[in-house]
Amino acid sequence: MKMKYICFILIVWSALLIVGCANKVNVESSESVDEYVDVKAAAWAFVKEKGWNHTAKDDWQSADVEETIADHRYVLLDKKDEDREVLLVSFKDVENVVAGTPPILVDSNTYEVIGYMSTE
């Protein structure tokens, strides 16, 4: 009789363990949600306005975004933005291009372009 209870408990415990491990929570990964779409769109509009879009791939959504400090390495549209933390948007270049698309600086609060890195 005791053996039946032990077997029953082991079967129930095993079933719960299998169900608990197999139940995956569907969590949307942070990579699939792009929090920088507006930043990339603003930078792409600036690139098109300057006529630099012929060196970049049209897939502007795949641009890389990173935080940086706006300093002497960048051409700033307004000097008041110097030494601020901003976002740097880098577009992927088409193959065999001599001078690539310059990285664009975007204000992280207003999503306005504030400068770019000179490639010349």
Image: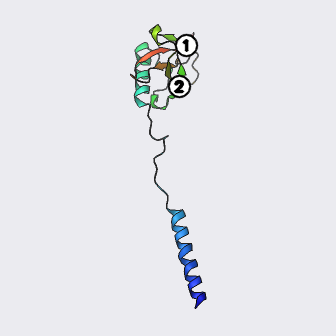
Q: Amino acid at mark 1?
A: Asp
Kindly tell me whether residue 54 is visible in this rendering.
Answer: no
Marks 2 and 1 sit apart, C-alpha to C-alpha, by: 13 Å
Residue closer to the observer: 95 or 31 = 31
Q: Is residue 14 above or below residue 30?
A: below
Q: Identify the image quadrant of residue 58.
A: top left
Query: Please, which residue is most extreme toward the bottom here?
Result: 1
Q: Which residue does the image show at 44% across and 34% down from the upper left?
A: 35
Q: Is residue 21 above or below residue 107?
A: below
Q: Identify the image quadrant of residue 41.
A: top left
Query: Please, which residue is most extreme toward the top here?
Result: 79
Say which residue label 2 marks.
67
Q: Is residue 76 left or right of residue 120?
A: left
Q: Position of residue 85 (x, y in %)?
A: 50, 20
- Label 1 residue SS: loop
Q: Which residue does the image show at 53% across and 73% down from the upper left?
A: 15
Q: Position of residue 77 (x, y in %)?
A: 45, 9
Residue closer to the observer: 7 or 41 = 7
Residue 71 is tagged as 1
- Label 2 residue SS: strand
Kindly tell me whether residue 112 is visible in this rendering.
Answer: yes
Q: Which residue does the image show at 50% across and 17% down from the upper left?
A: 84
Q: Position of residue 13 (x, y in %)?
A: 55, 74
Query: Please, which residue is most extreme toward the right here?
Result: 3
Crowd class of label 1 (few under 14; some 14 to 19; many from 20; radius 10 Å): some
Crowd class of label 2 (few under 14; some 14 to 19; many from 20; radius 10 Å): few
Q: Which residue does the image show at 52% across and 16% down from the upper left?
A: 70
**Quarter of the image containing the C terminus?**
top right
Query: Please, which residue is most extreme toward the front here?
Result: 2
Q: Is residue 13 above or below residue 113?
A: below
Q: Amino acid at mark 2?
A: Glu
